Image (tube, rainbow, N blue to C red):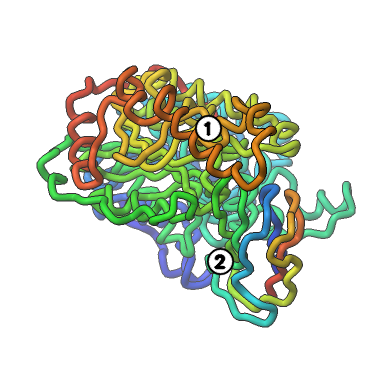
């Protein structure tokens, strides 16, 4: 074991008790299982330390920038250390974890440092989809140090972490905007607005803990034991009124073995993406949340889900897709924001995915959003629906208002409601309804909430274990 | 201070809080109606509702101000 040097001095220099020491070796030691860390070669003054060891009993490689040397700025030597760490991780087939605290490229080194940073980006891209890449941002990560984490699969931001391309001084001199580091690139903007960060931690220790948990979920995925969820009952979650919102987190927490790790919890919260375990096996859950935007899909949620699907597919993690969506969010804002282009990413991601992917329609799946949420047509392994679920182009009443517009226009206002209801019933009997969906095979089976967890577990267990052969571009 | 704005075009179906009320992060402020769904608008920070800009029956456009929390 490598002895952690001068931890107390590091703590004193840090920004309070919530921080890990500034010494990068001490930071790496906090990441690995006790006694498992071995330092990898790193030249004196490079500003980067690297190590290999165990995380939750599975192999991993990690590196950390040294904020005590030129503010953690990256020079060509430090970048070479990171590239070597990547080579090592790929050779071992283990996750690579970066602990970032860096002002960007070393200005004094000129273009050589930019070249070095570029070689890191190239190494990250070459390793994308090959080994899991996790970034933990503990302090400012500016310029090149911002794009480093952004190229990886999972970005974790500690309370004092800041990510931005150009700092407050440059922003002020160029645009005149007066903004501090936290507002520019702290936890608030990156967790709610930009989507850059998957997880925000209150302390450095918690941030490193998240990295360990994510690495363990990917390294030790386990196998399904369907019997273990036989008594897991999802009854009584949906509200009585089909129009009423509810929080889908309840469904997810009841479904999973233990609380999972929700990625991007505050960004595009109308879709929930959670990594967790079901019946002992790592799965990725994607769920519409009716509590936010009524569970509509929109530009940001489609992109968030698409990236999560490709991430899971790249590392062989089966998907569980929980569907309750009224459709795509309408409006000029959405169209101009590229809902067609960005929504297409979700279609592409699901259609391309080869991991077992099981869909559960809990309440409703309408229109384009029905297709996008891992429908049979996109290649779902299994599609389940709860007994009262609706699968349709749109709600039956809305459909007959369009189909029978002229006929309904002649109906007196007092009789309109009854006329619509009669036409809607007729419409459901002929084209709509869950029975029809089962008949034509777009829903495989109607399951009760009580039998849902076991049905999903069995569907995953009986599907061939596959892994997508593609990189994970940060969509 | 945090401004809570409408995320979509909708009718204001229920106003749940009043000016001066204390709310916690995640509390429902108003319930909108759109896409045939009741859509709660939630506080994104704890504080006092200092301004309420909508009433039941109003139509809000995307990005319209709903409330201010101090």
Please state if A232 lies on the left or on the right of A438 as rendered.
left
Label 1: which secondary element: loop
**Could you tell me residue A195's position as x and y percent?**
59, 44
Disc on res. B28 = 2
Chain under disc 1: A
Label 2: which secondary element: strand
Q: Residue at x 59, y 57 (%)?
A: A187
**Could you tell me residue A176's position as x and y percent?**
89, 53
Q: Foreground mark, 2 or 1?
A: 1
**In the image shown, does B48 or A445 lie closer to the viewer?**
A445
Q: Residues within 10 Å of mark 2 (few under 14, many from 20)?
A: some
Q: Residue at x 71, y 32 (%)?
A: A335
Quarter of the picture containing the N terminus of chain B is bottom right
In which quadrant of the rendered view does residue A165 lie? top right
**In the image shown, does A227 or B37 lie closer to the viewer?**
B37
Q: Which residue is mark 1?
A: A394
Relative to A182, say whether A44 is above or below: above
**Could you tell me residue A413's position as x and y percent?**
66, 45
Chain under disc 2: B
Q: Does residue A81 appear in the picture of this structure?
A: no
Quarter of the picture containing the C terminus of chain B is bottom right
Distance (Cα) linking label 2 and label 1: 28 Å
Q: Residue at x 60, y 39 (%)?
A: A300
């Amino acid at each position: 074991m490598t002895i952690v040097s001068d931890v107390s001095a590091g703590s004193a220099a840090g920004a309070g008790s919530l921080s890990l020491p500034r010494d990068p070796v001490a930071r790496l030691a906090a990441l690995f299982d006790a006694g498992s860390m071995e330092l990898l070669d790193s030249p004196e003054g490079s500003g980067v330390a690297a190590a290999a060891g165990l995380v939750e009993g599975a192999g991993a490689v990690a590196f950390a920038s040294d904020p005590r040397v030129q503010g953690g700025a990256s020079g060509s030597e430090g970048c070479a250390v990171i590239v070597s760490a990547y080579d090592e991780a790929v050779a071992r087939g283990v996750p690579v974890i970066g602990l970032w605290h860096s002002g960007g490229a070393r200005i004094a080194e000129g273009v050589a440092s930019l070249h070095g940073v570029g070689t890191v980006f190239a190494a990250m891209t070459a390793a994308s989809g090959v080994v899991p890449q996790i970034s933990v941002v503990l302090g400012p990560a500016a310029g090149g140090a911002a794009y480093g984490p952004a190229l990886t699969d999972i970005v974790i931001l500690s309370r004092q972490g800041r990510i931005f391309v150009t700092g407050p001084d440059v922003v002020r001199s160029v645009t005149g905007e007066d903004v501090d580091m936290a507002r520019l690139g702290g936890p608030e903007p990156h967790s709610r607005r930009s989507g850059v960060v998957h997880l925000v931690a209150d302390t450095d220790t918690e941030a490193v803990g998240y990295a360990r948990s994510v690495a363990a979920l990917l390294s030790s995925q386990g196998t399904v034991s369907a019997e273990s969820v036989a008594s897991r009952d999802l009854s009584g979650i949906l509200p009585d009124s089909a129009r009423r919102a509810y929080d889908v987190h309840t469904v997810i927490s009841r479904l999973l073995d233990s609380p999972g790790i929700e990625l991007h919890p505050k960004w595009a919260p109308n879709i929930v993406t959670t990594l967790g375990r079901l019946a002992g096996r790592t799965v990725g859950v994607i769920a519409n949340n009716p509590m936010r935007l009524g569970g509509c899909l929109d530009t940001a949620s489609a992109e968030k889900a698409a990236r999560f699907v490709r991430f899971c597919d790249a590392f062989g993690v089966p998907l569980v897709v929980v569907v309750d969506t009224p459709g795509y969010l309408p409006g000029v804002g959405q169209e101009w924001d590229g809902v067609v282009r960005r929504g297409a990413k979700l279609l592409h991601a699901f259609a391309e995915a080869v991991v077992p992917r099981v869909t559960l329609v809990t309440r409703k799946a309408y229109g384009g959003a029905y297709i996008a949420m891992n429908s049979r047509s996109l290649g779902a392994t299994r599609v389940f629906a709860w007994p009262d679920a609706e699968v349709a182009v749109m709600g039956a009443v809305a459909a007959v208002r369009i189909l029978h517009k002229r006929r309904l226009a002649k109906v007196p206002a007092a009789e309109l409601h009854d006329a619509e209801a009669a036409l809607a019933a007729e419409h459901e009997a002929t084209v709509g309804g869950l029975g029809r969906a089962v008949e034509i095979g777009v829903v495989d089976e109607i399951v009760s909430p009580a039998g849902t967890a076991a049905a999903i577990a069995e569907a995953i267990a009986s599907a061939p274990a596959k892994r997508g052969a593609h990189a994970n571009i940060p969509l | 201070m945090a401004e809570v704005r409408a995320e979509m075009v909708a009718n204001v179906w229920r106003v749940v809080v009043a000016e001066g009320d204390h709310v916690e992060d995640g509390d429902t402020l108003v319930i909108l109606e759109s896409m045939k769904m009741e859509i709660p608008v939630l506080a994104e920070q704890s504080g006092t509702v200092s301004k309420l800009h909508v009433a039941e029956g109003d139509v809000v456009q995307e990005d319209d101000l709903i409330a201010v929390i101090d």
